[in-house]
Amino acid sequence: MDEIEHKKVEHFFYNAMSSYRIIPLLAACAHSPATAKLRVIEDSIDEVAKAAGIDKDALKQYIRTHDDWLSYVMSDFMFYATKYYNFCALPEISNTREELYRFAMTDQLKSLDWPTSEFKVTSSVIIDQGCGFFPFIKYFVEANPKLAYYVGFDKRPLESQVFLKQLQAKFPDINIEFNEEDFWKSNAKRRIHSTNATLFIGNFLHCFQSPKLTMICLLENYYAVEEVIAIEPTPGSELDFCFKFHMYMHSGGKTVEQLDIDEISSLFKETTVQKLNSQYTMYSFKCRVRK
Ligand SMILES: C[S@@+](CC[C@H](N)C(=O)[O-])C[C@H]1O[C@@H](n2cnc3c(N)ncnc32)[C@H](O)[C@@H]1O
């Protein structure tokens, strides 16, 4: 697909994602096996492309290459529709949505280069707040042969205990723990009292209105931590379109901006900033300013 056609298709998706014709089609995409999808809805896609004045093959190619994110976005729509109308199918849709999110996010992260050497830390314990499905554990393990513990916290449950067992089997030399906990609801000081722990927050800060307030609460909860590593989409970088749309739906499209980083930096004595790849930046904060 050439650049102009690509931009046209993106523009179309911005405008049409919430139009009534495309939603049922994409919802069908979300619920049939990949190969069957396009065949079943081919004619309708042709019609939509015609109405939008875009090339039908370019549209189909876009759907194919963004299959995972589109499926997720559609299940997200269905999740909210179900939630608002109080249908009883919510748990089932919720599971599908979680699963599709994981596929989409895994693809998003896999498509990028992650320089392992940047994941070097000074401590032997990593606390991964908002760990999701632990996508960054392997880089920390590779970069830190002396790592002993990796402790994940997330408000979402893991898909199963088997997942945790498999993860542990993959990294037998460290202890892996998972705690299902809503960070905002938990007032208790964390069990991790060691000063030899690094707090890691990957794709976490942008989930909240105020990254600085989030950091202040994190520092209160993990009161012994002296090193915090954050990974966030680089402000202004060209994010994958569907990922951008997902961000837009969940946090109003707000990425963590330089101003947020400056505010957070004021809580620490040292800040280093490292561009990791075309889409992500790592921020490393060391030595808290204690009042
Ligand atoms: C964008 S995802 C990032 C997941 C993972 N760290 C990654 O980089 O792929 C944000 C994660 O933060 C978790 N999260 C959001 N709000 C939370 C809260 N209040 N307490 C605990 N976890 C939370 C979500 O469940 C989700 O797994």
Image (cartoon, rainbow, N blue to C red):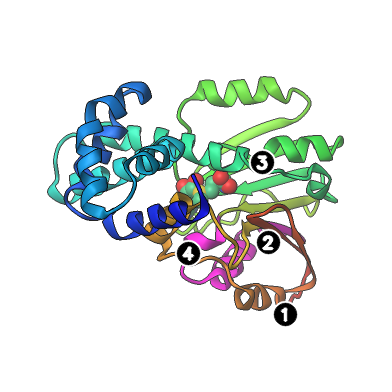
Is the CB atom of the residue marked by disc 3 within 8 angstroms of ligand 1's nearest atom? yes
Name the kind of residue labelled 2 in the image: Tyr
Q: How many angstroms separate mark 1 from mark 2 (CA)?
A: 13 Å
Residue 146 seen in render: yes
Name the kind of residue labelled 1 in the image: Lys
Q: How many angstroms separate mark 3 from mark 1 (CA)?
A: 32 Å
Is the CB atom of the residue marked by disc 4 within 8 angstroms of ligand 1's nearest atom? yes
Q: Looking at the image, is 276 positioned above or below residue 29?
A: below
Mark 2 in CB contact with mark 4 (< 8 angstroms) = no
Query: Residue 82, located in which quarter of the rendered image?
Result: top left
Q: Secondary structure at mark 2?
A: loop
Residue 109 appears at what percent x and percent y?
A: 60, 42
Q: Which residues are magenta?
A: 204-230
Name the kind of residue labelled 3 in the image: Phe
Q: Earlier in the sequence, mark 3 or mark 1?
A: 3
Q: Which residue is mark 1?
A: 291
Q: Which residue is mark 2?
A: 223
